[in-house]
Image (spheres, rainbow, N blue to C red):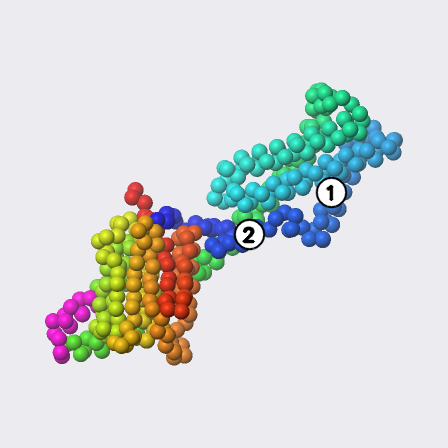
Amino acid sequence: MSTLFPPTQEERDALYAHSHQMPPVRFWKRYTRGRWLRLGLTVLLLTFCIGTFACTECWGDGRKMAVNYTMTFVYSLGLWLTNGYAVDWLDRYANWRREPVKRLVLTLLTSLGGSLVVITAINFWFLVIYRGYDPSVMLKPGVMARVMFPLLITTIISLVLHSRSFLMSWREALIRNERLQKEMAQAEAETLRQQLDPHFMFNALNALTSLVEEEPKLAVRFIRQLSQVYRYVLDARGRDVVPLRDELEFAQSYLFLQRIRYGEALQVEMPEPESVSAFAVVPPLSLQLLLENALKHNVATAGQPLHLRIELDAAGQRLRVINNLRPRRLAPGESTGIGLPNLQGRYRHLTNEQVQVQRTDAEFVVTLPVLELSAA
């Protein structure tokens, strides 16, 4: 059963998302020709500034100055790329917003660890391969001191790149939060529209009129069920989730009213509310939306009845609403086509689990994740 958590960001992000999620763009592919050019110019500028003032004794010796610039350039480029790839790798495995402490620790380990490898490799090449010294020279205090200045450069580069990653994650979180709020507002407006659907009340009153004259006892039960339906609608308004038991009881009342209208043209199978965990919850009126859609989009006759099945899997993690397909032509304006997208938007506001919609030649199936309310 999916765990319910309060509406925060996903970032249920992703970032991003959806869910639905595009793979992250790798560091190398993010750099277009123009960005590579800007990177090269930036590294050259750093090389000139750092190389010029870090070795003032090299000013009078062109060979030493060339070696100094070359070393500085290799340091700057190597450390920039090392830290840039670290940002890309970490973005895929640790999100700043969801796991800030883990991301900070991994940032320090990968950034400083990778930088030490680059610095050590460059010093080994310069001292052992280029200058011909014995490899033991790498352990001398003077050589170890040569590591400190590149590490300072590393700290600056890492600060720039990882700060940019944090700010981009924060910006994406704000954008996604704004989108989720918009989707929730649309979903609430659609839910309210369906709650007050005049067609449902019109059909219910017509059915009640016939019952009062022909079957008074059944008419009394019809009125009680209709009252329960509207009491539930009022109680659920403004709530993010409701117990699945209550939703199933509501569905029973709603389908009782529809069975009076459709008779044997509507066949229903559903679990007993008492068999469902008390901690299982779903967004309010989810079933009503799916049941109403099935009735609206399909023909139901005694000869070709509409079969509706509500199934809860053995683990209690998925609720499926299934109907056989008997498509009918809708009048203009009869369907807005935003009911299911709004339901999916409401779920994105609550969990990373997605609403699954499947259509075959014979059936239309919508699978809803069942959320779990903490016992505490």
Kindly indicate whether the residue at mark 1 contacts the one at mark 2 (C-beta within 8 angstroms): no
Q: Position of residue 182 (x, y in %)?
A: 45, 60
Q: Position of residue 253 (x, y in %)?
A: 22, 65
User: Height in image: 95 above or below 250?
Assistant: above
> In the image as oriented, which residue stretches furthest toward the left?
217
**In the displayed structure, does residue 92 sit left or right of residue 61?**
left
User: Height in image: 206 above or below 156?
Assistant: below
Q: Is residue 136 visible?
A: yes
Mark 1 residue element: helix
- Disc tally is 2
Q: Is residue 185 visible?
A: no
Q: Position of residue 354 (x, y in %)?
A: 42, 56
**In the displayed structure, does residue 223 sit left or right of residue 374?**
left
Q: What residue lies at 87% left-to-right and 34% top-to-bottom?
A: 62
Q: Which residue is mark 1?
A: 43
Q: Position of residue 308 (x, y in %)?
A: 29, 66
In the figure, residue 234 lies in which quadrant?
bottom left
Q: What residue lies at 48% left-to-right and 41% top-to-bottom?
A: 99
Q: Residues within 10 Å of mark 1 (few under 14, many from 20)?
A: many
Is residue 156 or residue 285 the one in the foreground?
Answer: 285
**In the displayed structure, does residue 317 sit left or right of residue 219?**
right
Magenta residues span 213-227
**In the displayed structure, does residue 131 sit left or right of residue 215?**
right
Q: What residue lies at 65% left-to-right and 48% top-to-bottom?
A: 28
* Quadrant including the C terminus: top left
Q: Is 55 included in the stretch rendered in magenta? A: no
Is residue 28 or residue 350 the one in the foreground?
Answer: 28
Task: Give whichever of discs 2 and 1 has the lower sequence position.
Answer: 2
The majority secondary structure of the magenta stretch comes to helix
Specify the amino acid type for callout 2. Answer: Pro
Disc sitting over residue 23 in the figure = 2
